[in-house]
Amino acid sequence: MKKALFPGSFDPFTKGHLDTVERAARLFDEVIIGVFINTSKAGWFSAAERTELIQTAVAHLPNVRVVTQDSELTVTAAQKLGADFLLRGIRSVKDYEYEKDIMTMNNHLASEIETVFLLAKPEYSHISSSLLKEVLLFNGDVKKYLPPAIYEAYLRKRDTHEKAK
Ligand code: ADP
């Protein structure tokens, strides 16, 4: 049974993330999306809310599930879930440099866990969750980069922010 953990903050979960998950679902028996509480960036939604939103976006994939991660090492989460693989996406050389160090550290912490990388599709390689939030905040159109339910939720969240000001 080949099980992969795809860890991330997914604030929001974009079509780039979805594409990675869909491709990984063909490679692994099970893909578990681990929604982490991001320690360095304040999220628009809590990890539990993000988990629920992502569930709606991957409902068509029977071998994919979404879990909220505790604040712990990614390799510890993978071990608890029985996942021998970590899945990460690479958009650019910058991602590669960043991911290489994380992979090496994770390999030092748990050498039995292998990290697998999928290159982002060109149509999604220029988007990041933080860029989409920034564009959204200034009323730019990011609809084509987000799964529909997630787009709607972030749009509503932005409007509440604006009203609260
Ligand atoms: P983190 O904060 O842990 O980097 P993210 O939610 O930003 O979490 O990203 C999770 C993973 O998805 C990372 O491996 C990242 O490189 C990858 N990723 C981010 N955006 C895209 C995209 N547009 N296409 C493919 N992979 C992506």
Image (cartoon, rainbow, N blue to C red):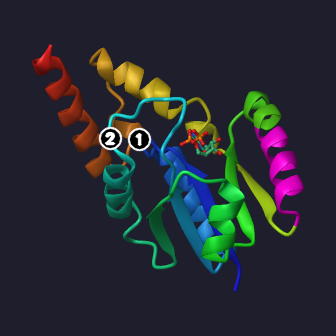
Residue pictured at 80% horizontal, 66% vertical? 113
Q: What label does residue 77 carry, if any?
A: none
Residue extending farthest bottom: 1
Q: Quadrant of the N terminus?
A: bottom right
Circle count: 2
Q: Nearer the viewer, residue 22 or 44?
A: 44
Label 2: few (<14), some or many (≥20) within 10 Å? some
Q: Quadrant of ligand 1?
A: top right
Query: Where residue 66 appears, x then y in whole percent?
Result: 45, 65
Query: Where residue 107 appears, x then y in whole percent?
Result: 86, 56
**Lateral position of residue 55 relative to residue 78, left or right:** left
Asked if residue 151 lies in the magenta stretch, the reply is: no
Residue pictured at 75% horizontal, 72% vertical? 84
- Dot 1 amino acid type: Pro
Disc number lying in front (1 or 2): 2
- Residue to which mark 2 is pinned: 45
Q: What label does residue 12 carry, if any?
A: 1
Query: Where residue 18 appears, x then y in whole percent?
Result: 50, 54
Residue pictured at 53% horizontal, 61% vertical? 33
| SS type, badge 2 | loop
Stretch in magenta? 99-111
Q: How far, Cα to Cα, is label 1 from label 2?
A: 9 Å
- Dot 2 amino acid type: Phe
**Lateral position of residue 68 relative to residue 8, left or right:** left
- Contact between labelled residues 2 and 1, with CB atoms less than 8 Å apart: yes
